[in-house]
Amino acid sequence: MANVKTHIEESDVLIIGGGMAGTGATFEARHWGRDLKIVCVEKANIDRSGAVAQGLYAINCYMGMQWDENQPEDHVRYARNDLMGMVREDLGYDMARHVDSTVHMFDEWGLPMMKNEKTGRYLREGKWQIMIHGESYKPIVAEAAKKSANKIYNRIMITHLLMDDEKENRIGGAVGFNMRTGDYHVFKAKAVIVAAGGASHIFKPRAVGEGMGRTWYAPWSNGSAYALPIQVGAKMTQMENRIVLCRFKDGYGPVGAYFLHLKTYTQNANGENYEKKWYDHTKAMVGEYIDHHPTPTCLRNHAFIQEVQAGGGPIHMVTKEAFQDPHLETVGWENFLGMTVGQAVVWASQNIDPKYTNPELTTSEPYVMGSHATCSGAWVSGPEDLSPPEYFWGYNRMLTVDGLFGAGDTVGGSAHKFSSGSFTEGRLAAKAAVKYIEDKKAEGINVSDKQYKDLKEVIYKPLENYTVGRNEITGGTVSPSYISPIQGLQRLQRIMDEYVGGIATNYMTNENMLNRGLELLKWLEEDLENVGAEDYHQLMRAWELKHRTVTSQCVTEHTKFREETRWPGYYYRGDHLKLDDENWHCLTVSRRDPKTKKFTMEKVPVYHIVDEKKEKKAS
Ligand SMILES: Cc1cc2nc3c(=O)[nH]c(=O)nc-3n(C[C@H](O)[C@H](O)[C@H](O)COP(=O)(O)OP(=O)(O)OC[C@H]3O[C@@H](n4cnc5c(N)ncnc54)[C@H](O)[C@@H]3O)c2cc1C
């Protein structure tokens, strides 16, 4: 590695990931930290990175408090209901009370917002969603971040966090490499905000082979948001709460605008409303939760999965009626053009015109994230004025590692933030990170040369593995001594798919399968010491795979720990096929010891702050 250049950058606030949460954090860090040095590091290019790279057609989280459309407590009730009771209400409320101000800034910055012609208010798609012409959503928020940061680094993948050598459990920065130049980058910082997005491609996707990149969540979201904190011993929560989406088949086109604005509906192959058919069955599993309004997303999935299993598929979205209205037809198509062009192409290739043919729906492979209709992620401190003592340790959105903050998909327990809520959470984390520095909590940090030099050896090892190992190949491309990142990825996806509740088993798992999955993941982890990378792009793939593997281990440990089926439709514990409020009305929290790499699990009470309903504490 002697020929690899090393660059050292010292900053006050370091933001990892320039997606929705990262741009929000970068913007807000400058607001509170006028004289601070703020650096943002992005794996792709901040102008078109993250889940919003291609644009969006709706901002899914807007209260409309100025018109009393909704208040933050309404949103807490909504998220709590959708997640079958399991949310951090302090975090949800905190995000909701600030999210409108974020959206108003987007409006000022030039994001084209649709308006209701009669009222002049933002045009609602649903109770929480407002409609935008959002193809340029990401470049607009990126501009705000670029104007705020001292420096934005593009094309650098962060692989590890640095720790302070003086004080235990305190952050010191991060390291990574530039995947174009191969240079090694060391970022020393007083506070670090991880905003590196969720995890796709840890479960085997429905589209494999040439269609492999076609997933619902961004294929480049590789779980760094989880792996980076897990590696340094930060606590995680609700990692079992993966999400399965009901989407248009093959293109994963969004259904929100169709259900909410176009008022389309689903039916089975015989034209029946199948959801009603599964009411008694679902009630026997989850009790009164099936009577909640709106029906929790996982339970609607459950009816879909059961119906297909029982032979009632394919399931269709009834578009033929709505598309007779030329306005709704336009909205239906524009919805894809603003965010999922691929769905329109798929329909064209399959001769589907939704005006004349009802398109098919499918349930996706599972994904892990903290900002959508699910809440996997880091266990963070909440805000001082709202959080009970167990949820508060000094600084809003700080993880259990001092000086390490999170936002967006990184943060667990706070579902339904979406793009606007993730940006808002980035702002909240940045404000707290600046206060952490101003309170002099980051004094005397020392990151030794040895620490980052040792990591350099580790990071570039896959290049070394390849250079040496390829000489042993006598024919073809398969090496006796290294595996390629794609081989490792496919192995990971099969383990997760077949043992941890993916599509192969119709989302079913149990303790025995999870134990076997953990064993196989351990061996994969060992073999990943021998992953080979032929160039810097493959080096990125190698590190993406390693991050996905650590994330998967955490997901599997959590899934094993929660001995109930809390979210039928997302996954099933075959050995505990019912929701069990008596024993599991609680949040799950894990920690991986950085030295032994062993996970420990605990139950933490879920506090219902809104409505102050006294819940039974978990045993
Ligand atoms: C298909 C889809 C549809 C959606 N629809 C809507 C919608 O209609 N309305 C809505 O409001 N929200 C929607 N969302 C949700 C919204 O996109 C997310 O809530 C939001 O983007 C999460 O913000 P984030 O910053 O956590 O992650 P992202 O925005 O994904 O940003 C993560 C960033 O981190 C970078 N990164 C990752 N790893 C590293 C690393 N190791 N080093 C450096 N950088 C790294 C990535 O390149 C990326 O830029 C949708 C999401 C998806 C995937």
Image (tube, rainbow, N blue to C red):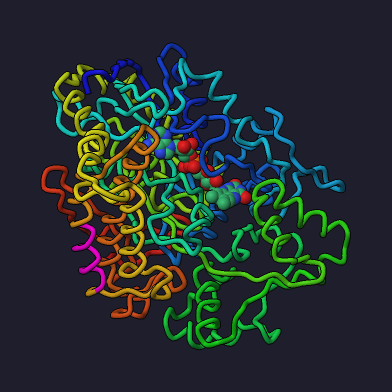
Relative horizontal placement of residue 243, taking residue 112 as reference (left or right): left
Relative to 529, say whether 76 is above or below. below
Q: Which residue is the extreme one toward the left?
A: 596
State the residue at coordinates (17%, 18%).
Answer: 449
User: Observer-nearest residue: 253 or 161?
Assistant: 253
Location of residue 324 by image quarter = bottom right
Magenta-highlighted residues: 513-522
Relative horizontal placement of residue 277, taking residue 538 as reference (left or right): right
Answer yes or no: is residue 425 visible.
no
Q: Quadrant of the C terminus?
A: bottom left
Relative horizontal placement of residue 299, taking residue 358 as reference (left or right): left
Answer yes or no: is residue 252 visible.
yes
Relative to 44, say whether 256 is above or below. below
Residue 120 percent location from the top left of the image: 82, 42
Does the magenta segment cover residue 514? yes
State the residue at coordinates (20%, 68%).
Answer: 515
